[in-house]
Image: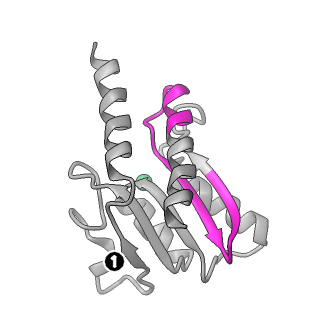
């Protein structure tokens, strides 16, 4: 089950890469219903906060007419940065599934470790490494192409 939602997130990541964005994608699911899908759009929207996780949280909250998405699962292809980890906490996401680790900008298992901070009032269950291989190869391909 979680595998197929991560496939959906990977499709969003691929589409983001094709738009010239860093290839990261995210999906929010609750009770088997997809509430939103998104890929990075920071360049397109000229918005440094337009990460896949923030966009998908906005979409799901708008769909529900609520500032929280309690009981929801968020799938994202890359370890969330500190900003997104905080947004995931604020949105009361129940479970976070992510793919590749992000040693440079990740804020979950490294760096700021937002969910371990005493000021973090809601901590989701975290499952890492799902679809990590595909996510890493997408990111590697994207940055290699930009360097050449
Ligand atoms: Zn982020």
Image check: 141 left or right of 29? Answer: left
Which quadrant holds residue 127? bottom left
Q: Which residue is identified by label 1?
A: 115
Q: Is residue 63 above or below residue 70?
A: above
* Viewer-closest of 75 and 109: 75
x%, y% of residue 92? Answer: 54, 80
x%, y% of residue 124? Answer: 44, 80
Query: How many other residues sit within 10 Å of disc 1, few (<14), some (14-19) or many (≥20)?
Result: many
Point 38% across, 82% down: residue: 120
Q: Is residue 40 above or below residue 89?
A: above
Point 27% across, 18% down: residue: 147
Image check: 140 left or right of 72? Answer: left
Q: Is residue 78 above or below residue 109?
A: above
x%, y% of residue 99? Answer: 37, 56
Point 51% across, 66% down: residue: 2
Specify whether residue 112 is in view.
Answer: yes
Helix, strand or loop for disc 1: helix
Ligand 1 within 8 Å of the CB at mark 1: no
Image check: 50 left or right of 125? Answer: right
The magenta segment: 14-37
Q: Was residue 86 drawn as part of the magenta stretch in this picture?
A: no
Specify whether residue 80 is in view.
Answer: no
Q: Could you tell me which quadrant the C terminus lies in?
A: top left
């Amino acid at each position: 089950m979680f595998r197929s939602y991560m496939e959906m997130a990977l499709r969003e990541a691929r589409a983001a890469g094709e738009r010239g964005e860093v290839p990261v994608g995210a999906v929010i699911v609750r009770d088997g219903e997809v509430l939103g899908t998104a890929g990075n759009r920071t360049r397109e929207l000229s918005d440094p906060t337009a990460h896949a996780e923030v966009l998908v949280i906005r979409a799901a909250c708008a769909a529900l007419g609520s500032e929280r998405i309690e009981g929801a699962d968020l799938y994202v292809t890359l370890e969330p940065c500190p900003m997104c980890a905080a947004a995931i906490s604020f949105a009361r996401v129940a479970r976070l599934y992510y793919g590749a680790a992000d040693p440079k900008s990740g804020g979950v298992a490294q760096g700021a470790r937002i969910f371990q901070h005493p000021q973090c009032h809601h901590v989701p269950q975290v499952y890492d490494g799902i679809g990590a291989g595909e996510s890493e190869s997408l990111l590697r391909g994207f940055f290699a192409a930009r360097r050449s």
